[in-house]
Image: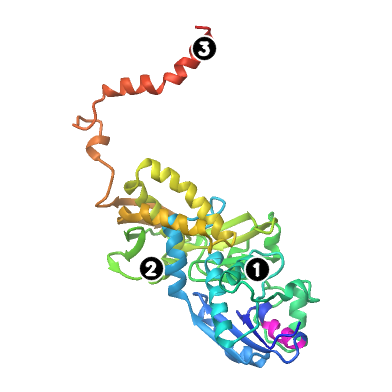
Amino acid sequence: MNYKKIVLAYSGGLDTSIMITWLKENYKGCDIIAVTGDVGQDASELEGLEEKAKKTGASKLYILDLKEEIVDDYIVPSIKAGAIYEGVYLLGTPFSRPLIAKKLVEIAKKEGADAICHGCTGKGNDQVRFELGIKNFAPDMPVIVPWRTWELKSREDEIEYAEKHNIPLTITKETNYSKDKNIWHLSHEGLDLENPENVPKYDEILEMGVTPQKAPDKEKNIEIDFEKGIPVALNGKKMSALNLIMKLNDIGGKNGVGILDMVENRLMGMKSRGVYETPGGTIIYKAHELLETLCLDKETMHFKRSVADKFGELLYNAQWFTPLREALSAFVDSTQQTVTGKVKLKIYKGNIINNGISSPYSLYSEKTASFGEDDDYNQYDAQGFINLYSLPTRVKAKMKAGN
C-alpha cells in the first residue's frame, strides 16, 4: 500500500535513525513527519535531532515537551496507586508510551497523515503499548511497523544499514545496549545483560547514579510532604511533582538508590532481563508507603495492595486506556483523601530508612497502642473476642477428637 504522509515516532536512536531512510525507500514519494516526545531524557538526546531527521529524509520534526504531562497524568496516579509490576518493578517505560501514542495521533490528524509508524521490535512490549494507544484515539489509523517486515534481523544489521547509507550514529556494535530514559527511570537491555548469569557492568552502564559501594560514607536526611497522596514539597520547599522527582533523582542517584536487576515476564510471553535505574521514584514510593501505614485503615490498606499489583499489570500490559484502569484510579483517589503528611527519611548507601512519619489524619493512637492504661481499650474484652474468634477452631478440634 502506498501512503502519502507518514507520522513517525522518532527518538533519534538506532531504530528510528534508519527508519526515515527505509520508509522513503519503501514508500516512494511519501512525506515523513517525525515526532519526538521530550519525556525527560537527557538533553543531549534532543540535540541536533531536527538536522538529523531532515538530513535522512523527514520534511518536519515536532519536539513536544511532555515532561509535566507524563508526571501529572501518568506517574502521579501510579504513585498514589503504589503501582508495581511483579513485586519490584516501579515501571518507567510504560508511563511514556500511552502519552506518546496520544500525541502521535494528534499530530497525524493535524498534518492529515494517512499512517503512523513506530520503531518497536516484534518481540517487545512497546509495540503493543503504542498501538493500543493509537487505536484508542484513531481506531482505523494504519500503523506501519518495519521490524515486522524489513530485511534487517538484528541491531547489528541496523548498524550496517546505517553505515551503508551514511546515517550518523552515537553507538557502536560494542556499546549497543538498548536503553530507554524518561523523567522516572533509565532501562538497560541487550549485550551481556541477555545472559542472566552475567553480573551487570554497573560502572560502565549506570548513568543516573552510582552503586551503593561508591556512594558517600555519609547519610542524607530528607523530608517529603504529601497532600492527598501527591508529593508536593521537599525539605519544606513547595514544588511541582516534576521538580521534586528531578531533585530526588539527583539525591537518590548519588547515594546508590534505585538500582534493579530483574528477569521479568514480558507481555509477549517471553522472559527478559533488564537493569533499571529509578532513584527518585524508589524514594517516593517508599515515603508514600510509609505515610499510608498511618493514614489508611487495615482493610483498605490490605485491599489496596492487590490494586497496586493490578494497576501495575494494566500499565505494563498496555491497558492504560481501559475502563478498569479508570475505575481503579477512582478507587485510589478515594483512598488518598487522607494521605497527607510528612515523611522523614535517611538515605544511606542504597538504603532508605524511616526517620519519622506524621499526619493530621493519622489513625495511630499512642495511648491505645501503649502498654499502659487507656479509656479506649479494656484488656478483659480480649477474652470474649478470642472465644468467639476461636469458635471454628474449637468446633473442628472437637470433631477430630470425636466429641
Q: Nearer the viewer, residue 201 or 232?
A: 232
| Distance between mark 3 and mark 1 Cα atoms | 59 Å
The amino acid on which the numbered mark 2 sits, given as a three-letter code, is Ala
- SS under mark 3: helix
* Prevailing SS of the magenta stretch: helix
**Res 268 → quadrant:** bottom right
- Mark 1 or mark 2, which has the lower sequence index? 1
| Residue 50 percent coordinates (x, y) | 58, 89
Image quarter of the N terminus: bottom right
The magenta segment: 17-25
Q: Which residue is mark 1?
A: 127
Considering every residue shown, the one lying at the far front of the view is: 140
- SS under mark 2: helix
Please rate how many residues cluster around mark 1, counting C-alpha atoms within 10 Å: few if below 14, some from 14 to 19, many from 20.
some
Q: Nearer the viewer, residue 361 or 202?
A: 361
Q: Is residue 29 left or right of residue 393?
A: right
Task: Inspect this view and state whether residue 171 appears.
Answer: no
| Distance between mark 2 and mark 3 Cα atoms | 59 Å
The amino acid on which the numbered mark 1 sits, given as a three-letter code, is Gln
Is residue 22 within the magenta segment?
yes
Is residue 395 within the magenta segment?
no
The tag on residue 399 is 3
Q: Which residue is mark 2?
A: 241
- SS under mark 1: helix
The mark lying in front, picked from 1 and 2, is: 1
At horizontal 65% and vertical 58% (from top left) the residue drawn is 267
At horizontal 30% and vertical 64% (from top left) the residue drawn is 235
Task: Inspect this view and state whether residue 300 appears.
Answer: yes
**From what the image shows, is residue 304 above or below residue 237?**
above
